[in-house]
Image (spheres, rainbow, N blue to C red):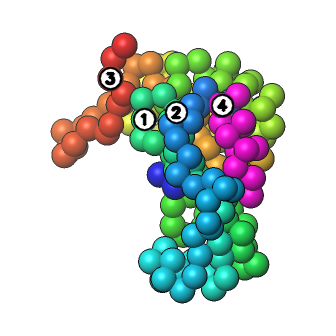
Amino acid sequence: MGLTVPDLDLATRFLAEAFGAKVAYDSLTLDDEARSGAETERQLGLPQGARIIRQRMIQIGVGPSLEVFEIEVDDRHPAARLSDLGWNHISLLVDDIEGVLARAVAAGGQALSEVHDNSRHEDTPGNGSVYVRPPWGGLIELQTLPNGHWYGPDSESEVWSPPQR
């Protein structure tokens, strides 16, 4: 998954303090030449004049890696809301939702509500969900699913779940 933030160090600190994220590697640092120019703009769909100045791969738990970009650009749009078209949030499956929520808020995130019931197929006993807005905007959903999902007879597949520890 890719994420663009205004300050890579602030984002890394928030993700580490809130969710225990760890840096896998820096693929572009301030010591490197920025990725920019017409070919980069064409390949990545960037607006004219945009410069990728830093890029870092971060791992949260056992889920997919998070590629985080710091990009200098004049034509910046605000982070997506749930009602906007396109990808709008990432969801982290956690064991201690209240504890992780408290850490996320202490690290500078904003809880949009209290932990609440999940939606259908995720509403087995003990499950819960809450959205958090990180310091740079956007949405991170925290979910706890101690009793897993339920599937009806018309289900064609099961959703990804982390390996049992």
Q: Quadrant of residue 78?
A: bottom right
| Residue occupied by mark 1 | 63
Q: Quote the CA–CA distance across marks 2 and 1.
A: 6 Å
Q: Is residue 22 visible?
A: yes
User: Hey, what amino acid is under mark 4?
Assistant: Ala
Amino acid carrying label 2: it is Ile
Q: Residues within 10 Å of mark 3 (few under 14, many from 20)?
A: few
Residue 32: percent from the left, percent from the top? 61, 59
Residue located beneath label 2 in the image: 60
- Magenta stretch bounds: 5-17
Residue at image coords 78%, 32%: 107
Task: Inspect the image, locate mark 3, and give the three-letter code of the amino acid beneath it.
Answer: Pro
Residue 79 lies in the magenta stretch: no
The alpha-carbon separation of the residues under discs 3 and 4 comes to 22 Å
Q: What element carries label 4?
A: helix
Along the polypeptide, which appears first: circle 4 or circle 2? 4
Q: Position of residue 5 (x, y in %)?
A: 68, 56
Residue 44's label in the rendered image is none
